[in-house]
Structures are given as structure tokens and as C-alpha cells.
Image (tube, rainbow, N blue to C red):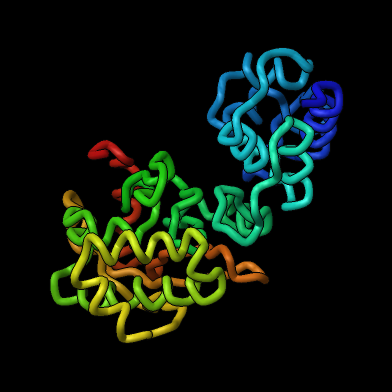
Amino acid sequence: MNRRDLADFLRQRRAALQPGDLGLPAGARRRVAGMRREEVAQQAGMSVNYYTRLEQGRGPQPSEQMLAAVARALRLTADERDYLFRTAGHSAPDRVVAAPHVAPGLQRVMDGLADTPAFILSALAETLVANRLAVALLGDHTHLTGFARSQVYRWFTDPAERELYPEHDRPRQSRAAVANLRVAYGELGPRSRAGELVRTLQSHSGEFTELWQRHEVARRFEDHKTLIHPEVGAIELDCQALFTEDQTQTLVVLTAPPRSTGRQQLDLLAVIGAQRF
């Protein structure tokens, strides 16, 4: 671990980052160039004291989980993230394997979507980050670990995951989940985390095994869907998906037409928040 280089790198990247890059108001009388330490710490989900010690070259070696959170908060590119990990004494994450690092371009787009549910998925349908309305609508899955963070894993192992969809739409959702996983499996190979996820699901779900044998391959995101919220009822939403250039991450945005019932329900969700979770 090179503490001096790590501290210098963090200070320089923080100074280069502006509040608008994180979807925050610039505010008045900012005494520092770029972001404040407390703002970066909040974005990373860690204490200000812990982040300050990193910038001062003090404290213990940060974990890979902490480094991933810092990389996400500072909107680091993949190259910058790899440098951060190596400087902190860790191996750089394998770029081919799904990782918690969020593509900065997608993150910036999502930061500007405060009034509609939006979230970013990995190639294995892991929820990497979600805005407040997405959490209110779908729940917060970013804190989960292992395969439990993957939507496709939860779909075939946790019956509660299916309550979000009307019963008549669940077979379509099952096929779409498997077809999406087929894409990742084909790109990453049977020895990857995608292959491990497939084998895990085959041992847990007969439905998954049957659908997997169909060999349907497609990145499917239904253009229009109905989601069921326990407090505001069935919400009709349009779904748009934006992929990174290498198509390893997807920004999913759920919208409703202005003045529609769906829009009114989303406005109500913004007030209710994530209380039920």
C-alpha cells in the first residue's frame, strides 16, 4: 500500500470533481476546489473521519469494498479505479467479471433523474446503484452481497421477488431473466461468475433449468410494464434501457406520461419514500 500516492490521488480526483457531476447543487461560497470531503464520504456511504484519514495517508488499509465505494463516489473511470486498487495494495478487479464499479457515464445520466425511478444493473442483473424513487418502488438491493444482489437469482429463489409483477406477466419475466443471463454466460464463459450463477440456479430451481435448456438469448427489457406496489397499487410504466459501450452495464429508467395515473402514483411514492422497506 502506497499511502502517499493514495492520499495524493484521492485529493486530486476530489478537486477535479464538481457538485454537478454528482447531481448536487453548486451552492455558494465553496472554499475548496471541487467536492468537499464530507460530500464524497456521504456519496461513498462512509464516515467523514474515515475518508479524511485516507486523504491524509493515515489509518488501516481500506478493503476492496471500501475502495469500490470510493471509486463510485469519485466517478472514477475503469483505469482510475484500477490504479486506486493497486495503490491501496489490492489487485485490480477483473474487468470481464461483473463488479460493483459503476460506469461514470451511466452514473452521470442517472444523477439527473431525480423524478423517475432509475437504477444500474451489471451483466448478471446485480443492482449496482439505484436512486431514491427506484428504492421506494422496488426496494433497496444495493446492500445485498453475493448472488442475492442479482435480480435473476432472487427471481428464481425468493417468491417475494415475484410479488412485484402481476401473476399473468411472471412467465414472460422468467423467460426474459434467463435470456439476459444467457447473454452474459455466452460472453463471460462457463468458468465465470455467470457460469457459477447458472449452476447455482440449476440446483435450486426446476423452472430455471427448463428455461435454460431453451437456449433463448436476448437482452430483454419490456417497453411497457405493470408493477405492483403494496401501498399505491398497480403502476403502469414505460421502460427504457441504456447500455454502456461494452454492454456490461445497463441503466434502466421507468417513466410515466405527464398527468397520467402512473405519474401521479410516482409523485405519491416520492412522498411515501421507502418506509415499507
Q: Which quarter of the figure has residue 103?
A: bottom right
Task: State whether residue 107 is above or below residue 170.
Answer: above
Q: Quick one: quadrant of the N terminus?
A: top right
Residue shown at the point (38%, 42%) measured from the top left: 144
Task: State whether residue 217 is above or below residue 102.
Answer: below
Q: Give the x, y percent position of residue 58.
A: 74, 13
How many dots with numbers? 0
Front-most of 256 and 259?
Answer: 256
Task: State whether residue 77 is above or below residue 45.
Answer: below
Q: Give the x, y percent position of residue 8.
A: 85, 27
Q: Is residue 72 left or right of residue 113?
A: right
Q: Is residue 58 visible?
A: yes
Q: Is residue 43 visible?
A: no
Q: Give the x, y percent position of residue 83.
A: 79, 42
Front-most of 115 and 241?
Answer: 241
Residue shown at the point (30%, 82%) measured from the top left: 213
Q: Give the x, y percent position of residue 66.
A: 59, 31
Q: Quick one: quadrant of the C terminus?
A: top left
Q: Is residue 99 left or right of residue 77?
A: left
Residue shown at the point (26%, 73%) measured from the top left: 209
Q: Is residue 174 left or right of residue 46?
A: left
Task: State whether residue 11 is above or below residue 85.
Answer: above
Q: Is residue 238 left or right of residue 81?
A: left
Q: Which quarter of the figure has residue 168?
A: bottom left
Q: Which quarter of the figure has residue 202?
A: bottom left
Residue shown at the point (17%, 56%) measured from the top left: 159
Which residue is outermost to the left? Answer: 167
